[in-house]
Amino acid sequence: MPSRRSIQRCGASAKLVVRALNAAAQRGHLVFGAFRVPCALGRSGVKALKKEGDGATPRGRFPLRTVYYKPRPGMMPGTILQRRALHRDAGWCDSPSDRNYNRPVSLPYRQSAERLWRDDGLYDVVVVLGYNDVPRIKNRGSAIFMHLARSGFPATEGCVALRAADLRRVLRAVPRRAEVIIEI
């Protein structure tokens, strides 16, 4: 495994790439310079034309927007990206008919919204990917994140999931305008 210095030397020119084995694969690898680690993908694989609730990870190039984290000792990740502490009422609207579709909201919320403060630890550190946010298109998909993986890398609902140590390494090394490329 590359050292922390070797991943930091990747610098601004390095690409953050998620590669699925094939379109239906629920697992893949994240590659960042010489750094290569396993990741979990959506239960429906990777799709270019993602739809709300289909369980697919979207294919394409997406900026890393904001890093949310649980405000506990040792949880705030070191990164140049914008960071925000999660609150117990943090949610993400996944109702295509709502004006806040694919945006953060406070819970309880009048429409369907995913809870970001979770007891299972998956969102202790979560990176919002700039998918379907500018512009937001109804039913194109919401709440696409890079977050912590469960043991054994089971499929996600459409996100990219990494081991905690791997996600923290990537966050320490990414440049300010980092993007992730998700491909087959």
Image (cartoon, rainbow, N blue to C red):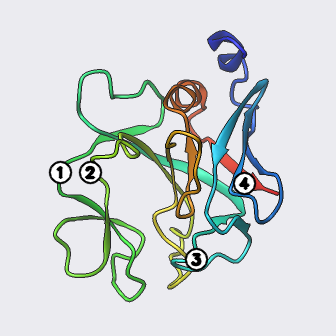
Q: Is residue 81 left or right of residue 116?
A: right
Identified at 20% across, 81% down, the residue is 110
Residue beneath label 1, please?
88
Q: Quadrant of residue 176?
A: top right
Whole-number angstrom distance, CA of label 4 to CA of label 2: 26 Å
Residue beneath label 3, please?
54
Q: Nearer the viewer, residue 67 or 178?
A: 67
Residue 51 in the image: x percent, y percent?
A: 59, 80
Whole-number angstrom distance, CA of label 1 to CA of label 4: 30 Å
Under mark 2, the amino acid is Trp
Under mark 4, the amino acid is Ile
Q: Quadrant of residue 125?
A: top left
Q: Secondary structure at mark 2?
A: loop
Q: Residue furthest front?
A: 152
> Which of the two marks, 4 or 2, is nearer to us in this view?
2
- As drawn, 46 above or below 167: below
Under mark 1, the amino acid is Arg
